[in-house]
Image (cartoon, rainbow, N blue to C red):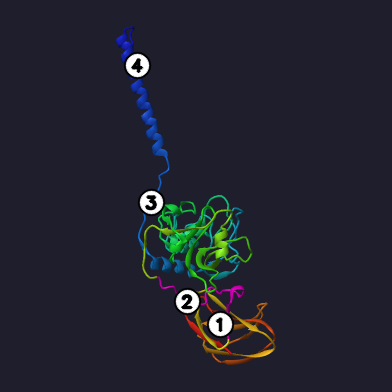
Amino acid sequence: MLCGDSMRYRKNCFIFLFALMLLFIVIVIIILISRLPKTEKIVIKPIKRSEAYKRAMEIIDFVWEYEAKELDRNDIKLPNFITNDKKTYVGIPYCWGGYISIDLSDRKEVKNFTDAIKKGYFPGNILTEGVYKDKTAGLDCSGYIGAVFKLREKVSTETLKNYFSYINLSEIKPMDIFNSENNHTFIYLKESYDKNGIITLEARHSDSIKSKDKTVVSYRTYEEINKGINGKKYKVMRYKGIIDDEVSIRMDQYEFNNNKNIAYPAKKDFIYAGGMDYIEDVDYFKLLVDEHDEVLIKIYQLPKGIEAQLIDDKENVLMYFDSDVYKIKLNKGIYYLKFSNKEISQKYDKYIFEVK
C-alpha cells in the first residue's frame, strides 16, 4: 500500500506526488516554449557606404513592365502611377508592409519583385492600415532601408534599432538614415544646393493624388525634419555594420531642382553644366525677366537623349531646344529651362548652356 497510515508512508506519498507535479509543470513549460514563434537571429552583415548607395540607386532606377489586371479586392489600393495600360515603369512601388525588392523577398513563393509580378502579385499597396496584404509586391519606407542594407528580415521603423545605432546630427554621412518610429524613415544623401534641406533616398507615399508612391530621390527641408511627424522627432541613425569608404554621389551641384518651386536660379553670363543623374531626374533653372526683353540662350551641349524646354510659370511649353544659339523675346515674368530624359534609360548624359 503506497500511502499507509504511518508517518513514513505519508511522507513518501507526499514526495512522490510532489515530484509528479513538478514533472507535469516542466512538461507543460517545454510544450509552451516549443510552440512560441521562432524569432530570427539578428545578423549584422558589413556593407560599404558606396555599395549601399549603389543598391539604393539601382532600386530607384529599376525598370519593369506591367499590364494591369482586374483588381477584385477592397483591402488594397494600387499606387497612383499605375495605369490600366501595358506600360514600362521606373522604381519599386510603395507597398505597405512589403519586403520584395529587385533581388530579395520575404515571401517563400517568390524570389524578387520581377518574379512576384510574373506570378500574379499586385504591384504595391498604398492602403497604410493593418498588416501586409497577401499577393502584393514592393517596399514600404522601412522595407526600402532593409533592401538597401540587405537585411535578412523585414524591419519596421520601430525595429530598425536592432540594426542601426543612434548618432548625433553633426556626425551624419551619406547613407545614414533619419527615422521617426511608427511613422517614416529615409536615407540621407547630401545637403541641397539651397542649404535649406537635404537630398534623400526613400520609398515615399502620401494621400496626395500627385504622390509618387514608390522609391525615389527626394528632398526634405530642415524645417520639415526638425518638426518631425505625428509629434515624434526624426532621429539620426547609422547601420551597425557600415564600412566607411568614399561615396561618389552621381549628382550635379544644382540638385535638388526637380520642380519649378525649387528651381536653381540661373544667372546671366554664367555657364551651367548639369546632367541627368538618374532616370527620372528633371532639372529646372529659373529665369527672371524684369521687363520685355530679348534673352540669348546658348545650348553648347545637348545629347540626343536629353530634352530641353523653355516653359512659363504655368508649365506651358514655349519652345524646344537643340544645340544652338537662340534669341528669344520674352515679356516680364518668370520662365524656366527644363531638362529631362527623353526615354526610360540611364546614360548619365551632360548638358551645357549659358544665358545672356
Q: Which residue is mark 3?
A: 42
Using a 10 Å C-alpha cutoff, classify the residue at mark 2 as few (fewer than 14 neighbours), some (14 to 19) or many (20 or more). some
Point out which mark residue 13 bears.
Answer: none
Of the 4 image quadrants, the one containing the C terminus is: bottom right
Q: Secondary structure at mark 4?
A: helix
Question: In the image, what residue type sits under mark 1?
Answer: Glu
Using a 10 Å C-alpha cutoff, classify the residue at mark 1 as few (fewer than 14 neighbours), some (14 to 19) or many (20 or more). some
- For the residues bearing labels 3 and 1, Cβ distance under 8 angstroms: no
Residue 96 picture location, percent across and down: 54, 56
Q: In the displayed image of the protein, which residue is found farthest to the top? A: 5
Q: Earlier in the sequence, mark 2 or mark 3?
A: 3
Question: In the image, what residue type sits under mark 2?
Answer: Gln
Q: Which residue is mark 2?
A: 346
For marks 2 and 3, give the CA distance. Answer: 36 Å
Q: Nearer the viewer, mark 3 or mark 1?
A: 3
Report the residue at 34% width, 7% height from top: 5
Point out which mark residue 307 bears.
Answer: 1
Question: In the image, what residue type sits under mark 3?
Answer: Ile
| Residue in front for this viewpoint, 154 or 336 | 336
Q: Secondary structure at mark 1?
A: strand
Residue 311 picture location, percent across and down: 64, 81
Q: Which residue is mark 4?
A: 14
